[in-house]
Amino acid sequence: MPGTKRTPIGRRPGPRVTPRAVDLFERVMRLKRRQAWSPEIRDLSVELDAELGMMPWSPDVLSCDEDEPRDDMSLPMGIEDFHRSRAVRLELEAAVRARHKAAREARRNGGAPTPPT
């Protein structure tokens, strides 16, 4: 039987946490501590979603601060999308914590970077 002539579909990879995404996330979270909403928060949120490669229907990583989806989310696909967005948020939070820890260690060592382990 001859091989197929079908062209494979190039699927987009899932969300990727980049240093720029961590920067944007940290900036918007600092703003959200001072105010609930602003045009700047909206713009940074859109920029963050684009940097992460999030799909338009995916819940915003900024609104996934609870472990479980809202009660009004009943469709399995919506719940899966929530958990994917929640996982990305947890990854962003871990990256911010790691960045702060590295900065504290650098200050403690007199500005010298810590050697990689």
Image: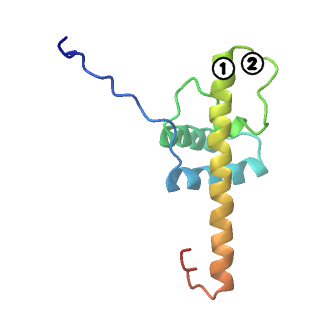
For label 1, count other residues whose C-alpha is less than 10 Å away and answer few (under 14), some (14-19) or many (20+). Answer: some
Q: Give the residue drawn at x 69%, y 23%.
A: 79
- Do labels 1 and 2 touch, CB within 8 Å? yes
**First of labels 1, 2 by sequence position:** 2
Q: Is residue 69 shown left or right of residue 94?
A: right
For label 2, count other residues whose C-alpha is less than 10 Å away and answer few (under 14), some (14-19) or many (20+). Answer: few
Q: Which residue matches tag 1?
A: 78
* Structure colour scheme: rainbow
Q: Quarter holding the C terminus?
A: bottom right
Q: What residue type is labelled 2?
A: Met
Quadrant in the rendering for residue 40: top right
Q: Which residue matches tag 2?
A: 73
Q: Which amino acid does label 1 sit on?
A: Gly
Rendering coords of residue 4 (x, y %): 22, 15
Q: Give the residue drawn at x 66%, y 43%.
A: 89
Q: Which mark is residue 28?
A: none
Q: Distance between the residues labelled 1 and 2?
A: 6 Å
Front one among 116 and 27: 116
Rendering coords of residue 97 (x, y %): 69, 61
What element does badge 2 sit on?
loop
7 over 88 or under it: above or below: above
Front one among 38 and 112: 112
Q: Is residue 43 shown left or right of residue 38?
A: left
